Amino acid sequence: MPLPRLIPCLDVAGGRVVKGVKFQGLRDVGDPVELGAAYSGAGADELVFLDISATIGAQAAAVGVAGRVAEQVTIPFTFGGGIRSLADASAVLEAGADKISVNSAALARPALIEELARSLGSQAVVVAIDTEGGRVRSHAATRDAARDTVAWAQECEQRGAGELLVTSIDRDGTQDGYDLEQLAALRDAVSLPVIASGGAGNAAHIAAALAVAQAALLASILHENPARLVTLRDELRDLGVHLRDAA
Amino acid sequence: MNVAIARYGAGNVRSVELALRRLGAQLTDDLATADLAILPGVGSARSCMEGLGASVEVLRERHAAGKPILGICLGLQLALEESEEDGGVPGLGIVPGRAVRLQDERVPRIGWATVDPGGEAYWFAHSYAAKSPATVATSEGHSAIVEHGSFTGVQFHPEKSGAAGARFLERCLSRV
């Protein structure tokens, strides 16, 4: 299997990286290109940009950000948020992104996954699943999607998804550790790569997640500070996790 | 140094273009006369072959004339005789072998993996790989680089492989 991956996640709105608690009181914390390049320099294996604005015009802004990131960043990156159609996804990939991520749009119309996979290839199609207590949440985790998490993951795989980005809503932002039980259930249920998200508080949490998932998404633990990624990578190596030598 | 990228309406061509420009290459549209032709590839084998259209013959003639071609990811697989993707798709047939579905524990195979000989890690994102006697480097048992005449194919994405990828592309350009 390829090496375990560390993936910083940057929330963007209006073309800027933002930070907010539960989508309230968004604060501008920097330029996506500058922060992305800094994370790349700090040894990130990939980047994820999530457009959380979900406003009219957000899609055009996302294409602009993807295009600017591609000019400066030479590692793979995923763009998610507001992608509802093949046309939306194609525009982001043509701008230079490697993968797109869909969440609520796929829950609303699961055939979207097939359309994306057929045209773009499965490797470009990430389905993001927000889960709480084994059930799927939608619309930025504000609604119950009336689906079992494992069953939805299997349906995503059958429809051609290439990867699952699984966020434990009950752990997100807590820094109490990933939901290892949920991740293990998904590992056993699907043969897609799984990106674990939600709950990273220290290197031991990440090492535990990487024992059951192929990648770990890092958000609040980094505090928009690329230097923290450098120390985390060192701590993970000390814990015996075999990470890429990014030199 | 003139480099032409084969276009077929799909695939992440912009990242390849940006990587080449960073290395000082001039981009041209003339696939037949460029110093190096690049066959990129993201998507599915059938749609890419259909999208290539007239470029198929241009690429075959380039190869027959010994002019360099670099195939990336699906671009490597398309150069083979056949891919088993989409129920079987004939390729350009300029490299012996066929593309077969991966039987790994996790498919697609996504992530950084080392390529031997050399030991550098590059970015992979694929569900099929070449079974070819022209394989000259492997990654975890999979064909990672093939060389056949003037064709070099890489299963990984050098344009997305950071500093290691830039070094690889620089070596490709310096050999032309």
Image: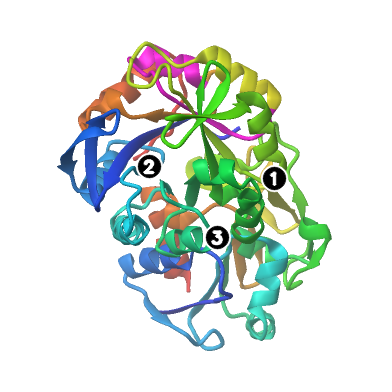
Which chain is disc 2 placed on?
A
Pointer 3: what residue?
A86
Q: Verify whether residue B4 appears in magenta.
A: no
Residue at disc 3, secondary structure: helix
Pointer 1: what residue?
A159
- Of the residues shown, which amino acid type is indicated by label 3? Leu
Which chain is disc 3 placed on?
A
Residue B90 placement (x, y as % from top left): 80, 69
Q: Nearer the viewer, mark 2 or mark 3?
A: 3
Q: Which of disc 1 and disc 2 is earlier in sequence?
A: 2
The residue positioned 28% from the left and 36% from the top of the image is A42
Same chain for the residues under marks 2 and 1 in the image: yes
Colour treatment of the image = rainbow
Pointer 2: what residue?
A47
Residues A54 and B102: in front is A54
Say if mark 1 contacts mark 3, CB within 8 Å. no
User: What span is colored magenta in the figure?
Assistant: A190-210
Left or right? Give the position of A122 relative to A71.
right
Residue at disc 2, secondary structure: strand
- Of the residues shown, which amino acid type is indicated by label 1? Arg
Residue B18 placement (x, y as % from top left): 36, 66
- Judge whether B101 appears above or below B171 on screen: above
> What is the crowding at mark 1: few (fewer than 14 residues within 10 Å), some, or many (at least 20)?
some
The residue positioned 75% from the left and 38% from the top of the image is B103
Same chain for the residues under marks 2 and 3 in the image: yes
- Judge whether A119 appears above or below A16 on screen: below
Q: Which of disc 3 and disc 1 is earlier in sequence?
A: 3
- Judge whether B62 appears above or below B123 on screen: below
Rounded to the nearest angstrom, the CA distance separating label 1 from label 3 is 15 Å
